[in-house]
Image (cartoon, rainbow, N blue to C red):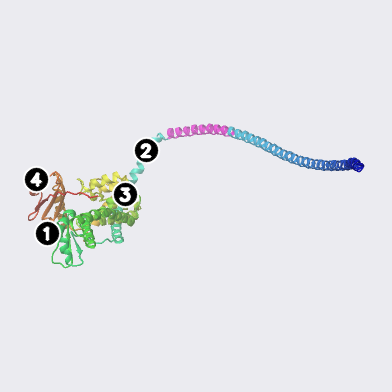
Amino acid sequence: MNDIAISILLFLIGLFIGIILIFVINYIKGNSVSKKIESLLDKAKKEADKIKRDYLLEAKEEAHKLKIETDKEVKEKKAEAKEAEDRLLARENNMDRRDQTLQNRENLLEEKENNIINKQKSLQDEQVKIEEIKKQQVDLLEKIAGYSKNEARDLVLKKVEEMMSLEIASYIKDREAEAKLEADKKSKDLLVSSMQKYAGDVANEQTVTVVSLPNDEMKGRIIGREGRNIRTIEAVTGVDLIIDDTPEAIVLSSFDPLRREIARVTIESLIQDGRIHPTRIEELYDKTSKDMQIKVREIGEAALFELGLTKVDPELVELIGKLHFRTSYGQNALKHSIEVAHLAGIMAAEVGENQLLAKRAGLLHDIGKAIDHEIEGSHVDLGSDLAKKYKENEVVINSIESHHGNKQATSIIAELVAIADALSASRPGARNDSLENYVKRLQDLENITKDMEGIDKTFAVQAGREIRVIVKPDKITDVESYKVARDIKNKIEETLQYPGTIKVTVIRETRATEEAK
């Protein structure tokens, strides 16, 4: 029991001592930590003070730099402002000097003007005095001579006229004779020189065109079954096809060169295409007619280029091209017009007139022939109307109106065009009177149906021995077509003169066409 008590007592004593030791140790440790903390705080405070001082120094240095830069910029701005102010002051001074100079000049000018006015007044006074003295002298001379100024002049002129009248008359007579001889000689030289400088081809217009065929079998294909192809060709083109024993060739006969050309191109296109039937013939004819319009324009442009003419209305260019397919007594109208233009231009250059204007007048002098077969009237009147419509020069218009003597020529160029026209027409081989009469007869034959109702197209074929009339099927019936043929026959017999007989054929055709889509 005592051992237990002793053990417990010892345990309690050890426990008490351990607790006291723990408190002592903790106290010691607490004092050490506090010291460390205080040391750290002091150190941190010192570090912070150092950093603060460093930042303050840097801030002061930066502020000092900024102040220096600002002061420098302010000084520069002040210097610039000072320079600008100096320049403005210098400019104001210059302006003041200029104003002063201008004022001085103005004063000088006013002074000079006043001096001039004073001198003018003095001169006028002197002039008045001189006139008075001259008048007094003239009056004194008239009084001494017994004649007035006008009477004395008339007397002197009369004496001189009496003395010189015979000499003047003799001189004028001699000069007139020399002028006539010189003018006659110069005119002949001018005409001969112009003809030598331009030598055109001899006219060779015909009324037939030969088309070459690849073989004789093609003749049969052109004729077609029961002649339907050849009838279609003759109907749409208005030319007469002559198919004879001539190998590998057919002949196209028509008085109208344009028709013959369209028919020739159409037939040659059919031969190349190989498909020869009525529908294809009409298609190619329409295409060829459109292409021919382009070709006509190109022919007109080529004529203008040859003559060096510009600024011509496009419609007038086309009319010039149409002259290529017109003839005058067998002479190609366009070639004749170009020839007249060349001759007129050469003569105009020789006499000092406008060469280009003379060429223009010469080219257009027969322009009315391009439409005289379409519109009633002479080619002179039609040509004059066309020139006025396209605003041509008055000299050109007068040249057209006067080249056949219908109107008085008002310029030298108009006279030259008339001379050139006569030269071109009268040279050997230029024209063929019989061909012109033949063509005119065919034209009259075609024009016989112009005023008749229901007529679509009229073609003179077989050298004028037949006239084919295509009527409009919606206006003329089959029965009425016989009456139309009889009326045409009666009109031909009443109005035309012709050898032999003329066959009248009226063609009426109705077509029904639909297109499957």
* Numbered circle sitting on residue 192: none
Q: Which residues are magenta?
A: 115-144
Q: Nearer the viewer, mark 3 or mark 2?
A: 3
35 lies left or right of 425: right
- Tell me the distance, in whole angstroms, between the alpha carbons under discs 1 and 3: 45 Å
Please state, as top left, top right, bottom left or bottom right, where the N terminus lies in the image.
top right
Q: Nearer the viewer, residue 423 or 244?
A: 244
What residue sits right under mark 2 in the picture?
Answer: 154
What residue sits right under mark 1 in the picture?
Answer: 226
Percent across and percent down for residue 71 are: 77, 40
- Tell me the distance, in whole angstroms, between the alpha carbons under discs 3 and 2: 65 Å
Can residue 416 be seen in the rendering of this structure? Answer: no
Residue displayed at 18% across by 64% down: 218
Closer to the N terminus: mark 4 or mark 1?
Answer: 1
Disc 2 packing (10 Å; few <14; some 14–19; many ≥20): few
Percent across and percent down for residue 197 are: 31, 61
Closer to the N terminus: mark 3 or mark 2?
Answer: 2
Closer to the N terminus: mark 4 or mark 3?
Answer: 3
Q: Nearer the viewer, residue 36 or 177?
A: 36
Circle 1 sits in a helix, a strand or a loop, which is it? Answer: helix
Closer to the N terminus: mark 1 or mark 3?
Answer: 1
